Amino acid sequence: MINPNGCRWCGIEQRGHAIQYGPPGRHTWTQPTQQQIKDRMLARRAERET
């Protein structure tokens, strides 16, 4: 499950993120957009309900 406040690109929490490789290539932790946070929270809620 992805943390709602995880990296914009890969979802990993800021603490312990370091440098990762993902869709935008090599990246450091980047704050997620407000829409990403909302979508992740809704997905987490839906997963708990099923």
Image (cartoon, rainbow, N blue to C red):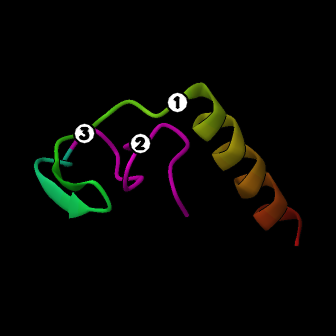
**In this rendering, position of residue 14 left or right of residue 42:** left
Q: Amino acid at mark 1?
A: Thr
Whole-angstrom CA distance, mark 1 to mark 2, is 7 Å
Q: Which residues are magenta?
A: 1-15
Q: Which residue is mark 1?
A: 33
Per the image, the residue denoted by label 2 is 8
| Residue 38 relative to residue 31: left or right | right
Image-quadrant location for residue 49: bottom right
Between disc 1 and disc 3, the foreground one is: 1
Q: Position of residue 27 (x, y in %)?
A: 17, 47
Provide the secondary structure element on which disc 3 rests.
loop
Q: What's under tag 3, amino acid-wise?
A: Trp
Q: Which mark is residue 29?
A: 3
- Residue sitting at 25 percent across and 39 percent down? 29
Question: CA separation, marks 2 and 3?
Answer: 7 Å
Q: Name the residue located 37 percent from the left edge and 56 percent from the top edge.
A: 10
Q: Which quarter of the figure is the C terminus placed in?
A: bottom right
Give the spatial CA distance, label 1 vs label 3: 13 Å
Percent position of residue 18, x then y: 12, 47
Asked if 1 appears above or below 30 in the picture, the reply is below
The type of residue carrying mark 2 is Arg
* Residue occupying the point 69% across, 36% down: 38
Tell me if label 1 and label 2 are in contact, CB under 8 Å: yes
